[in-house]
Image (cartoon, helix red, strand yellow):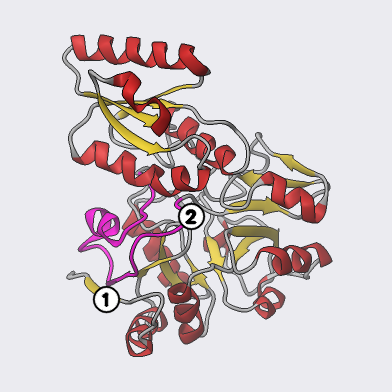
Amino acid sequence: MKTKILEINPKKIDLAKIKIAAEEIKKGKLVAFPTETVYGLGADALNKKAVAKIFQAKGRPFNDPLIAHIADTKELYRLYKQVPPVALKLAKAFWPGPLTLVFKKSELVSGIVTADLDTVAVRMPADNIALSLIREAKTPIAAPSANLFGKTSPTTAQHVVDDLSGKIEMIIDGGKTKVGVESTVLDITVEPIRILRAGGISLEKLKEVIGQVKMSKELEGGFRSPGMLNSHYSPQAKLILVEKKGDAQVEEIRRLASEYIAQGFKAGIMAKEENQNKYDRFEVKVIGKGTELETCAANLFAILRSFDKEGFEIIIAEGLKEHDLGLAIMERLRKAAAPKQML
């Protein structure tokens, strides 16, 4: 099929174009669209056949659940079995925004969306294009990241074109995404509430609103949220994450880069801006200043993709401090560096 691309300015929404895209969703087709986190691959969340096309286009395993995107908190009463007070409290504090809430699903939600779990993941994106599309489609939109399964998430329309052109009906080009890493996913069925995936809303911010929050490292009852598979976020190149601190980190990265280059590999370094000049003999891409984690998050996936596009075989990445968005960045880098899981 030929994939149509619609350019829409997020600051000046062209409703006529939004309606064209919404009609595709209503017809059970696939539309990639920007959110504040990454580009999503959307289908009518209440249409089983349409949702199945997401898995087919991405090559995504059916045991990896999807997120349902909404434009009004009233939709929670349709998608959840019941709406707990904590869901409304979190929605008031962080929606629209990069926070996904997992709770018991209603009968309206098909098992294909939830990987046959009894819970459904829901969020309201903070992007004018995404919200306009959901409103015009008049249905929740199921949307994982708009990339081939196992590849790094897309933060520009071109990234989506690179992976999915010819596999989906439409891509909305709304420019580069702002946050650059996916939403934080919270399991609100348990006490204390658990973070299933670190993301755009930090642990620190969540604690300010709801008090105790636990990081979940175990996979209980299957993959309870998107992004729990190690095969997510991976570049084609082998990624090596160096988590040492200070001079020891730089020395280890220089050693590894020298060894791989001596063996004939094309190796590059992903570094913090303040360390860039310490790798003078090597090919370096700068993620941002170590103190400017929002910039680092926004640049992460684009840099990994650029290494792949330029034919690098090895990426050696500096670790970042694990606070605020650094937690989400490091979670993705560790998954990208982990051995690939057999599905």
In which quadrant will I find the C terminus?
Answer: top left
Percent of width and height locating residue 106: 69, 70
Q: What stretch is highlighted in magenta?
A: 152-180
Q: Which of marks 1 and 2 is nearer the N terminus?
A: 1
**Residue at horizontal 26 percent and vertical 36 percent from the top:** 307
Residues at marks 1 and 2, CA–CA distance in whole angstroms: 22 Å
Q: What type is the residue that disc 2 sits on? A: Val
Tell me the mark number nearer the camera, choosing from 1 and 2. 2
Q: Is residue 135 left or right of residue 190?
A: left
Q: Name the residue under label 2.
A: 179
Q: Where is residue 280 in the image (x, y as percent from the top left)?
A: 26, 20
Asked if 308 appears above or below 135 in the picture, the reply is above
Give the x, y percent position of residue 146. Answer: 37, 58
Q: How crowded is mark 1: few (under 14 residues within 10 Å), some or many (20 or more)?
A: some
The disc at residue 6 is 1
Regarding mark 2 in the picture, which secondary structure is present there? loop
Q: Residue 199, relative to residue 81: is it above or below?
A: above
x and y, in percent, of residue 334 in the image:
49, 30
177 inside magenta stretch: yes
Q: What amino acid type is highlighted by mark number 1?
A: Leu
